[in-house]
Image (cartoon, helix red, strand yellow):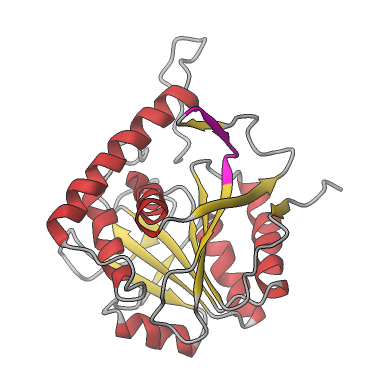
Amino acid sequence: MTEPPVVEVDADLNAAGALVVSCFPSIGFVSSIVAHYLVDKLGLEMVGGVRHPKLPPVCLVQDGKPLPPMRFYSGEPLCNMERCDKIVLIASEIQVIPELNLPLATTLLDWCSENGVGAIILIDSYAQGIGQQHSIFDDDESEETMLGIGSTDASHETLAGLGVPLLKQGVVGGITGVMMGECRRREIDAMAILAESDGDIGGSLPDARAAARIIECLDNLLPAVHLDPEPLLAEAQRIEGEIREMMAVHLNPPSESGGAPSSMYG
């Protein structure tokens, strides 16, 4: 049997009561833009990562420093949620292979339970059309929709307070779908916020506007962010450019067969 993923974080990290924000790859690089923005604006420090033989054999390089492809960050901004006095951010630009979704979700949720975290927010995005990871039935004809999923009644109340309508019907795939299902089974307080993105089906076009909508929503939970809409969009676009460059250089080398490089965003 393949060994499970392993979370390795600094020994002095105290995650009791933390708000865990999970940002795995999504259409339009939305989750990655949100993660980079929060790290920058909240002054979060990298405190560890996740190891597993089936994760791609790469490291990200930023400012001359190697970073693991799946990282944990931490800091202590003020939260507007009960039981939240710090934040732990899980960030990755690596698409999780299907067979690793459940083992990874199990490892992450075990770590959250063992460390007494307060709540979990999963950041994701979706696009309409055939071949998408999520099948979202959305009655809103606007292209700037945000939808929420909550594992508990408490998370439904939090989403309502943020002004995020609940997803009435749909299928959510990947690590977000697996983690939300496991959170309900374990009765863990978790919510997912999904922004509609105009990124292409392959997810290779960054969508700073969708990321900005989610960050504005998180501003209600994290007063330390203190966002203004216009500077936010400009900042999201700047981060979008950095992520595009980083992904192109480090994670999408040209194919030896001469074909188009594969997208890690499915």
Q: Residue at x 82, y 46 (%)?
A: 2
Residue 225 drawn at (x, y percent): 31, 65
Q: Is residue 236 left or right of residue 190?
A: left
Most extreme residue toward the right is 1
In the image, what residue occupies the spot 39% across and 59% down?
Answer: 42
Location of residue 17 by image quarter: bottom right
- Against 251, residue 34 (above or below) is below
Per the image, is 132 magenta?
no
Q: Is residue 200 at all visible to an observer of this figure?
A: no
Viewer-closest of 211 and 11: 11
Please determine whether, in this image, residue 171 is positioned above or below residue 100.
below
Instruction: Say above or below: 56 vs 78.
Output: above
Q: Is residue 66 magenta?
A: yes
Q: How many marks?
A: 0
The picture quadrant where one finds residue 202 is top left
Span of residues in magenta: 64-70
Residue in front for this viewpoint, 27 or 75:
75
Above or below, comparing residue 146 to residue 241 in the picture: below
The x and y percentages for residue 214 are 30, 63
Left or right placement of residue 54 versus residue 144 in this view: right
Residue 237 in view (yes/no): yes
Q: Is residue 116 left or right of residue 2?
A: left
Q: Is residue 100 left or right of residue 164?
A: right
Residue drawn at the location 56% of the way across and 79% of the way down: 118
